[in-house]
Amino acid sequence: MNRVWWVLVLAMAVLSCHGRAAVVGGGLARVRAAGVLRWGGDIQGGEPYVYEDSEHGGRLTGFEVELANALARELGVRAQFVQNDWSALIPTLERGTFDVALNGVEVTPQRVGRVRFTRPYYIFGARLMARRNDPSVQPTLASLRGRRVGTLANSFSYELLRNVAEVVPYEGVEEPYIDLVQGRTDAVLLDDIIAARYGEPKPELRVAGDLADGYYSIALRPADDDLRAALDAALARITASGELERILRGANIFNDRQRRLVTWTDDDQRRMLGTAAAGQRFGWSHVALFGKGALVTLLLSALAMCIAIPLGLGLAVARLYGPSALSRIAGAYVELYRGTPVLLQLYVLYYGLAPIVKLNALSAAVLGLGMNYAAYEAEVYRAGIQAVPRGQMEAALSLGMTTPLALRRVVLPQAFRLALPSVTNDFIALLKDSSLVSVITVVELTKQMTITAVDIRGWGLPGALCALMYFTMSYPLSLLAQRLEARLARS
Amino acid sequence: MIEVHELRKVYGDRTILDGITASFARGQVVALVGPSGGGKSTLLRCLNGLESFDGGAVTVGGDRLVPGGAKANRAALHRVRQRVGMVFQQWNLFAHRTALGNVIEAPVHVKRVPLAEATERGKALLARVGLSHREGAYPHEMSGGEQQRVAIARALAMDPEALLLDEPTSALDPERVGEVLDVLGALAADGLTMLVVTHEMRFARDVSHRTLVLHGGRIIEDGPSREVIDHPKHERTRAFLGLDRR
């Protein structure tokens, strides 16, 4: 049991180190000395923010690239882009990997409590989209009460919808609209720039209206307040000179809302930042949510295994004993599912096949994981079947059994016993792999952890609890596997 | 009841069985002897279709096996295997079943005998091979001799018309050989048809009625056991028996 505690203590230590800025002292002096302003963003966010221009050999393009270049010029330095996953921009900023986060970072109360924001460089509308044939969605938050509404996790819109609608959190900007067309959600609330690019081109969808104004600002570490002031001054200069307008017009995203940027005052800034939402304390309500997430993880894994075990058994038997066509199909299945990422398989199952079979997220997750793990189970059983001595089959056949009966009564029970430790180990792996299904909007334990980490502005406690819960689920299974192995070794 | 006609089997360029013709009558106990690689075990395994062959035919009762393996003989194989039981050198008891479980497995699942009836019969068979006290033992808990006696009881449970035994005592410790031979002797006395591949010349001479000597895939000597073993005609048989006695 001692070993267990060491692992936990180590996990806590690693997690609590997270979030401490590696760099201290004046940010402005540091940037000037280095001669570079390192700005973090995610090219996956795509047009028009920051993206690789395929027509120009993958050159970095986007209105934020131009903005970063203009600001760096104003500071007398060079701008340098640092690629980082969008959802982790703030933690990475805190770590000190780059000086500023500049990539559609929306001003939300949670973030205000955590980082310093400059004045905004873009004002967006939280745009509500619905299906053209569904008039029940009105351009008010109230009309969304109890409806399923898609948005990006931890975004400005996510905060608006919280406690109002049933929020379906996505990790990409295209998928919410695909699901809306498919009828898996009732509406999508996202920044107008995203809606214009990914939602409005779809003929099945309509714009219901804009619910609120939101702001893109540059985020900095609290310690770099002098750099924040310098960037504010630079932003003010390029806004007044009309350069910002030119950049936005170049990206075709300038509209009347942006005129407020020119007259932006300290009062506007105070209103935008609002009262920094007092960071939520990690409490029992969070623990309850984690418990729910853990239940989803467990249910998902158990159901997926209920598919994987019989399907894997069928595949293994087909491969070893089936007629050659069936055997080849089973072999191809195993190689295909083992040879491609499960993430891709989940995408194909949930989004790719949506026009043909409209699975809900949980069913798609169970089916996707189950079908993937079936390939691994098939190999485990195949090894198990081959480890049963040939004489067992011969003895069964000699007693007048048919091959299927001999398999069922003699070979498979022994093969299954041989395979059981591996199957248990696979189940432990599945428990953790199940976190991948958050890409198709299932909120399981890991997703719950990342959502909570933003709410309470810290990864330490949620991370430790999340780790503890996974551990609590997998350790007994691990003990079980050890006992099964020991029993196998004895007989 | 078993007819073998011009049986041929080849592995690549090696001829394992080179045109074997023989017939075995009901109630006969036949010993198949000869040097290793002579084709004894292969012949035995062809008789119940565990091995396919390339030419000739095997007829058991009214069922005929032809070249082509399981595909060509599906229906006949099933019936042949219910007519003749098989006992292996390595016993091949079902590792996940007890002694009694091994004996009743096929009656219950192949012949659909009610469990209670099969159990009663199974216990009687275990008593017959002297293992009443080991009913609940698993194979890995038993000695080789005990396992082989369970294997014989398991084969008898299907009421076979004949028993094929493939070197039933070769894998046993010397002090365990006797207990298995005693059981086989009792079965022979009861009139059971048996074909036994064996290196036990004493058993062949004293228990079996007829001895076949196989060499190079052919039958080189066939006759009453005492005559073949005491007065072998073929020089190969003499050499083989001479080696065996040394």
Image: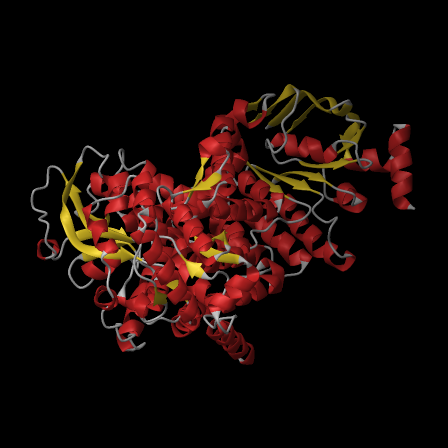
Q: Residue furthest front?
A: A241
Q: Nearer the viewer, residue A269 or B204?
A: A269
x, y percent for residue A381: 52, 47
Is residue B119 visible to the viewer in this orientation of the structure? no
Q: How is the image coloured?
A: secondary structure
x, y percent for residue A229: 38, 66
Along the horizontal axis of the image, is B99 left or right of A48?
A: right
Along the horizontal axis of the image, is A470 left or right of B180?
A: left
x, y percent for residue A240: 30, 53
State whether residue A415 is above or below residue B205: below
Q: Residue furthest bottom?
A: A2
Q: Nearer the viewer, residue A448 or A229?
A: A229
Along the horizontal axis of the image, is B117 left or right of A198?
A: right
Is residue A155 visible to the viewer in this orientation of the structure? yes
Please name the residue shown 37% across and 39% down the image.
A348
x, y percent for residue B9: 70, 24
Count all numbered tags in the image, as a single digit. Answer: 0
Q: Nearer the viewer, residue A381 or B168?
A: A381
Q: Quadrant of the C terminus of chain A?
A: bottom right
Rendering quarter of residue B210: top right
Along the horizontal axis of the image, is B214 left or right of A487?
A: right
Please name the residue shown 40% across and 54% down the image.
A86
Q: Nearer the viewer, residue A73 or B160?
A: A73
Please name the residue shown 65% across and 35% down the image.
B28
